[in-house]
Amino acid sequence: MKIVVTLKQVPERDALLSISPGADWIDESALSFTTSEPDAYALEEALRLRDSQPGSELVALTAGPERSASVLRDALARGADRAIHVLTSSTHDPLSTAHLLAAAIRVESPGLVLTGLQSDDLGLGQTGVILAHLLGVPHSTLALHVEPVPTGIRVKRELEDGWFQHVEMPLPALATIQSGGNQLRYATLMGIKKARNKELRTIDAASLGAPAPPAAVELTRIFPPDKQKHTRTLAGSSAEIAAQLTGILRNEVHVL
Amino acid sequence: MSGVLVVLEPRPGSDPAALSRISLEALAGGLHLAQQLSLPCIAALAGSGSAVQLQSPGFAPLRAAQLEQIYAIEHPLLAHYTADGHTLALEQLIRKLCPEYVVFPHTYQVRDYAPALAVSLGQPLVSDVIAIRIEDGSPIFVRQLFQGRLNADYRVTHPGSAPIFLSIQAGAFRAESLENSNGPATAASIVSFIPQLTEAQIRTRPAAPFRESARTVDLASAPLIVSVGRGIGEQQNLALVESLAAALGAELAASRPICDLGWLPMERQVGSSGQTVAPRLYLAVGISGAIQHLVGMKGAKTVVAINRDPAAPIFEVADYAVVGDLFEVVPELIKAIHATKGE
Ligand SMILES: Cc1cc2nc3c(=O)[nH]c(=O)nc-3n(C[C@H](O)[C@H](O)[C@H](O)COP(=O)(O)OP(=O)(O)OC[C@H]3O[C@@H](n4cnc5c(N)ncnc54)[C@H](O)[C@@H]3O)c2cc1C
Ligand SMILES: Nc1ncnc2c1ncn2[C@@H]1O[C@H](COP(=O)(O)O)[C@@H](O)[C@H]1O
């Protein structure tokens, strides 16, 4: 089976975010970047599937600016067989991103596409489902595990409130992966060495045909969230803070 | 017609079926939008027996709401949720009604099919909306970015393109006024809508939902909770928050990644895919405060948060904030608690 996994590059989780002067995005100049967390789980699940199905191939795919190639190199080091980088500067509209990803995927005609459930930066939770629609394949979201069955694949998906469900789909199909289903592997030194000889192909977005129509809804302003409560910030040394907090827990919250 | 169409869901597993709380909140959001824009509001529910469901007690708040009409989308193939069934059925109703806005609750089910529905009509979905403002007669939708660390305004830049799809986050609108309205029904008529669906169009085969293990810890009734997040760094550091919980006589809870890593059992997870808690004290240690975590603990009477990132969204819901390194603050706090208790 040929598997394509989509990976998005996002700012590191603990990065300090500052709003850009035009307030239409964040200032990216001083940031370090990584793979969006659900995508790391999608890659892990894809690697396990590939290894359990002899003769399978795993292709890692991203759409983004030049710097986003690092998520592909990381995927190759963890074991992906080859990688495709669609070079584009605009990845804020899920429909146009899905258009680019679909164009790159169509020529590969994979049996299975795995995406992340939602990206850590935009958090839209849409690109995978739109991608399935554009590819004309069935999909399932919030998947923790994907297992081959005679009729296609069986997905274990998460439901609300601690419930789960199995869903079967014929191939080709797409699943969006929720974080936490596996423990992630690290890239080994050996893996990093091997990755240097693996194919990483760059395709210019413009060569992938007509872009999606312009989005009817656009992000126009970014701002810090409002406080929902009146918050008292405790200051001082750790010992002073501990003393204040203990006083509060005893005299105001009445739990000590 | 033009208007606001709100697509509702029964609470999963409710028997007899009842409207979910988040559906009522989405209804409140839809009614708000309709009122602000002077548009009529319509509701719809899809299933195999939705007309009968809509007449049952669990749907009384819907019947009492200021709605122009309620559509019961009915088909035997909608008995069990599938993305294909829901997408096709709703697409047909939307083509018939031509609403300007279609509003959903941001549930797992909506996540599964609404993006496909919107794109099949060539229209955008603004997912996970936390607020709606009207400026110069047009709506602005607010949603979170970077797991709640920043917010963003989204505007309709191509007016006239309809419908715009929205999914509304839990807690964004208040459902109380709808829940408690026991006044006479405004008598919105319930209209049955039978979509054209064939078995061959449904490509996925869902099995019955199941639970993995019984819950033995009931965090819902715990009066005091110490909750730990990924800021704890390593499994062996958990001993620190365990001593804090012991000093306070509190239950230990966690954010999802801690349970995913297997450091604490799943049943101690707080949030939208874990337990919902409402203690007198919720002490969050090294938790960033993603929306999926907040929905599980917003009901706490007092929230204390310890986090080294002053911009962590947990501070938005905190009564007391400690901006600092948990490895410095927590040991001092344990000492101070023991001292206060005279131990
Ligand atoms: C569909 C869905 C369902 C989900 N359900 C849940 C759920 O039920 N419950 C849940 O919790 N999450 C859930 N999540 C995940 C959620 O989105 C977040 O990813 C998760 O809550 C983050 O956990 P965290 O705060 O522990 O980790 P992080 O976001 O990594 O935050 C760690 C925090 O620790 C702080 N920190 C680091 N070091 C220190 C230090 N030394 N001292 C003090 N502070 C420090 C950092 O500043 C940071 O704010 C769900 C996600 C999805 C998409
Ligand atoms: N620019 C991109 N390149 C590769 N994959 C992407 C990109 N944008 C989104 N995706 C995939 O789609 C998933 C959902 O993204 P989103 O709709 O932004 O929440 C991500 O987890 C990725 O797997």
Image (tube, coloured by chain):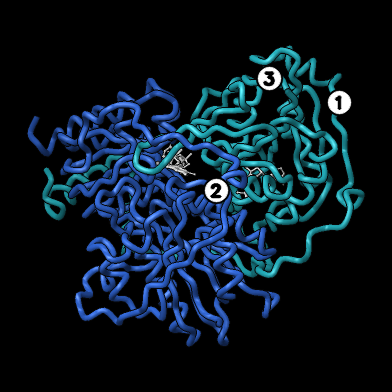
Chain colours: A cyan, B blue
Residue in the picture at 79% in, 49% down: A100
Disc 1 secondary structure class: loop
Chain on which label 2 sits? B
x, y (%) of residue B206?
48, 37
Q: Amino acid at mark 1?
A: Glu
Report the mark closest to the observer, 1 or 2: 2
3D distance between C-alphas at marks 3 and 1: 17 Å
Residue A199 numbered tag: 1
SS assignment at label 2: helix
Circles 1 and 2, Cβ within 8 Å, touching? The answer is no
Q: Which residue carries the number 2 mark?
A: B83
Are both tags, 1 and 2, on one chain? no
Q: Is residue B110 above or below residue A146?
A: below
- Image spot of residue A196 (x, y percent): 83, 21
Measured from the top left, where is residue A132 in percent x and y?
A: 67, 45
Chain identity of mark 3: A
**Residue at mark 1 to residue at mark 2: CA–CA distance:** 36 Å
Q: Nearer the viewer, residue A140 or A83?
A: A140
Please give the residue where the numbered disc 3 appears in the rendered image: A50
Same chain, marks 3 and 1?
yes
